Each structure stands twice: as structure tokens, then as C-alpha cells.
Image (cartoon, rainbow, N blue to C red):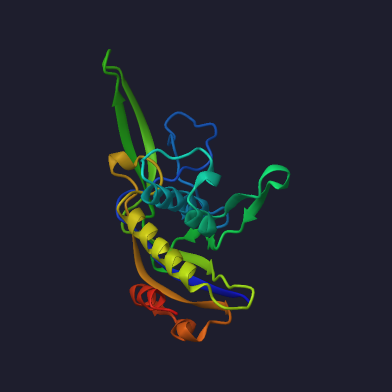
Amino acid sequence: MVCKMELSGRIQVLTGLHIGGLKGFSAIGAVDSTVIRDSRTHFPMIPGSSLKGKMRTLLQRHMQRGSLLSLSWDQDKPEVKRLFGGKQTVGSGDTKKERIIRARLQFFDCFVSSEDIDKELVEIKAENTINRLDSVANPRSIERINRGIHFDFRLSYEMPFDDAGEPLYDEIRVDFKNIYNMIALLESDYLGGSGSRGYGRIAFEDLTLKKRFGTLPQALAQLEEATPWEEAVTLLEGAR
């Protein structure tokens, strides 16, 4: 049995956002670090990989006791691995083997919302670092997505079922609690580079959840239609 849900809405850039593109030769006077862009339109974009990596890191740090992260994704909590994917060791001795854990979440690249494509999308921010010992300046220029620009956001979730085709409600409730938390965590943190200097603050807007494909269990029939995010989370918390 298959049921795919889609969480959609918009991301608003609250402070200049820099997710770097490819670095090549820069002529004198050129921008030192540009933003990544859609190769078709040349508009700036937010890669799904940037959202996935940041959200996974924030969720894992939230769920573990210490602040230091393991270098291996496969050391993440089971609740994190079932959302983002990973490996699990099963068996012991001669029967020991690794099992692949499929990700229940699929991220999408985020492109500039249609109402903003005629706006000034980027700015060039001049920065400077001063050597503490000899006071030598090191000027540079950074391209950033302007605050106020919106990007269309999509996130897909594949609902888990047991062998009898019954929804695994306990896991579903935990999954959506974690999705809710990682969105709130990202809004309180930053996306992209230079977050300690104020870059990359974002906000999620107009989030709704609905069925994208497959068959919904009767307890969640309301999600056949787009449902406001907060209302959807409440519904999922009470699903049995």
C-alpha cells in the first residue's frame, strides 16, 4: 500500500541568504562568492540538498544529549534515519549485515515564487576582515539573495504501513512531530553560510499538507484536501 503526502508553502528570506555556487576564475572587480542559480532561468534558488542537510543536522542535535555530532550519518537516531535514510546493522556474528533504510522524506529544489521574479533578487554585500596583528585589510564581496524574496517549498512524505496494510500510526505521529520540530528549528537557526554574521534567516509561510498520491486511511480523510499545517499536525497527533 502506498500513500504519499505533500507539505507545500513558501520560504521567505528574512535576512540576506548566501548558498554558494561553483567557484571559478574571477576577474579583478568581480564578485568573490556568488549564489547558486537555476541553470535554466539563472534566477537564484535554494537546493533541496541544502534544506535536507541542515534539517537533518538540526533534528539530530535536538534529539541527542550532547552537542557534538557523529561524522557518520548512520550513527543518527533511528527516528532521524527513517525520515532521511541511512543504514542499520542487523544480526550478529556470521549473520551480521547492513540493511538500507529508505528515506520517507523527499526534498525538492526551491525556485523563486512567480510574484517575485520581477523584483531585485540579489545584492552585492561588501565585507572586510582585518588582521589582528598587522591591521592589514582583506576586502571581499558576497552575493546574497535579498530579504523579502519568496521561494516555493515542497516536501514529500511516504506514509508507512505494516504487512497487513495498516498505517503505522505510532511512527507517523512521531515523524510529523519531528518534521514540525525541524521546521521550527530551522526558523530559529539559519540556512546557508555566514549565519553567525546574521545571514540566512528564513520563515516558512502558508504551509499546507495534503495527499499527493495513493490511498489515505479513513482517520486522515480530511487530508484529501489541502489542510493548514498546524491543523494537519493536530489531526495526525490524534490519528488511531
Nearer-the-camera pick, 203 or 31: 203
Is residue 20 at least partly visible in the picture? yes
Q: Quadrant of the N terminus?
A: bottom right
Looking at the image, residue 137 lies above or below residue 58:
above
Residue 187 percent across, percent down from the top left: 32, 56
Q: How many marks?
A: 0
Where's residue 120, x and y in %? 36, 55
- Residue 231: where, in percent of width, then height? 34, 77
Taking the spot 61% from the left edge, 78% from the top edge, the residue there is: 165
Q: Residue furthest right?
A: 94
Outermost residue toward the front?
Answer: 93
Residue 240 versus residue 178 in the image, above or below: below
Quadrant for the C terminus, please.
Answer: bottom left
Quick check: 53 above or below 148?
A: above
Q: Nearer the viewer, residue 23 or 189?
A: 189
Observer-nearest residue: 215 or 53?
215
Q: Is residue 44 in view?
A: no
Q: Is 164 on the left-hand or right-hand side of 237?
A: right
Residue under the point 64% across and 73% down: 163
Horizontal side, residue 108 vs residue 11: left or right: right
Q: Residue furthest top?
A: 134
**Quick one: 211 or 238, which is closer to the camera?**
238
Residue 91 relative to residue 25: left or right? right
Residue 102 in the image, given as x and y percentages of width and height: 61, 59
